[in-house]
Amino acid sequence: MANESRVRRIGVLTGGGDCPGLNAVIRAVVKTGIFEYGLEAFGILDGYEGLVHNRMIPLDESAVSGILTVGGTILGSSNTAHPFKYVPHGQKGAEPQDVSDQCVENFRSAGLDVLICIGGDGTLSIAHGLAEKGIPVVGVPKTIDNDICGTDVTFGFDTAVQIVGEAIDRLHTTAMSHHRAMVIETMGRYAGWLALVGGMAGGGDIILIPEIPYKMERVFDVVEERSKRGKRFSIIVVAEGVQLPGGGYVIRQEVADTHHKTRLGGVGVWLAKEIDTATPVESRAVVLGHVQRGGTPTAYDRVLATRLGHAAMVQAVEGNTDVMVGRQGTRIVAVPLLDVADRQRLVDPDGQIVRAARAVGTSFGDE
Ligand code: F6P
């Protein structure tokens, strides 16, 4: 296809926490650009950090060859670099500066025409801010949390679900041998998608997610009832963003200078102790943590990532910017970044997925 647009050179960056499929998007962006439009592509290193400091590398066909199946990102990422509230690397606690003009200057001096930003809510809302300063941007949604508005699903989620499901399979057998309640804590921040879908895939007996308030007594009852029925083990999947009964979260760390100031983690350990104390059933906790973000993407994520990368490049060349590409139904569409930035897509507590889980006997600790 001939390139009749004014777009000749594009930049691509990966921001925020990584997830499987980022390299597949980079590959699709670069290959579509080269093969379909005869463009030049540049990779910006370490997310917005590289845009602030003008660190870019040329990406030709060989640079993206062989990366479809590789986890992580060949460009590196940063979930602290924020051009509008920038704190230089290694200077934690320093007064944040607005260095967005520097980013615009670096973008222009590199001769870039469009910037493709692959990232989660933080990266996409910064992308929208840069669009308002005149940089034509196209966003690509990524996250294992699956919580981005404007898309039915994000790449990385399917791989993480697979990892959660496999972990539960393994924990099932040891839970059975020892007649234990095994608590598995998933990531996902304040959204319950990963616990819900991963928990369903692993046949969790109890799934606790932030979107459905639970009662501790109900959790204890379910564990004990199962025990009395001869099922002397239970699998309990809990999302890291589930609140404690009195309100508040279990927090791993509070951090300044990042989009997400609270690092969650540990609610599973707390829950296992409570079950251990309140019921006759011995309990253990496993926090799956960053294992959920690592490794090779599933076939589904590779294909979704490829479609999104291709679509992002098409939007860029057609001049449809300040948008994010996403999957709605079976189609890839473009939605305004404004409708996506700083919003979150949560599980519908009355939706079909939750109803299906309840129908097969999964408890959400609420009834
Ligand atoms: O948003 C992705 C995610 O993996 C969340 O599920 C998790 O809470 C967070 O990032 C962990 O962030 P970090 O890598 O900074 O510890």
Image (cartoon, rainbow, N blue to C red):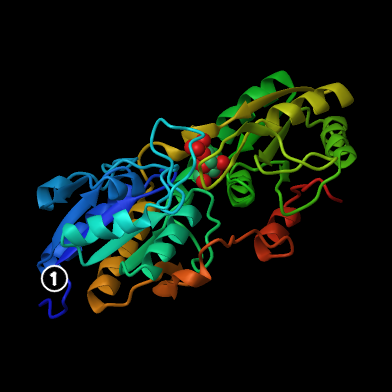
Rendering coords of residue 340 (x, y %): 51, 66
Measuring 40% from the left and 74% from the top, which residue is drawn there? 333
Kind of residue indicated by mark 1: Tyr
SS of the residue at dot 1?
helix
Inspect this view and state whether residue 208 appears. Answer: yes
Between 6 and 314, the one lying in front of the other is 6
Inspect this view and state whether residue 28 appears. Answer: no
Rendering coords of residue 285 (x, y %): 67, 26
Left or right: 54, with 367 as reference point: left
Measuring 52% from the left and 48% from the top, which residue is drawn there? 259
Between 212 and 165, the one lying in front of the other is 212
Measuring 70% from the left and 48% from the top, which residue is drawn there? 209
Between 363 and 307, the one lying in front of the other is 307
Left or right: 55, with 80 as reference point: left
Rendering coords of residue 199 (x, y %): 63, 44
Q: Which residue is mark 1?
A: 37
Task: From this view, report whether residue 77 is shown above or below residue 223.
Answer: below
Rendering coords of residue 71 (x, y %): 34, 40
Characterize the local packing of mark 1: few (<14), some (14-19) or many (20 or more) Cα atoms within 10 angstroms: some
Ligand 1 lies under 8 Å from the Cβ of mark 1 = no
Q: Can you tell which quarter of the image residue 336 is in?
A: bottom left
Task: From this view, report whether residue 180 is shown above or below residue 117.
Answer: above
Between 272 and 137, the one lying in front of the other is 137
Left or right: 61, with 228 as reference point: left
Number of numbered callouts drawn: 1
Left or right: 73, with 31 as reference point: right
Image quarter hosting the N terminus: bottom left
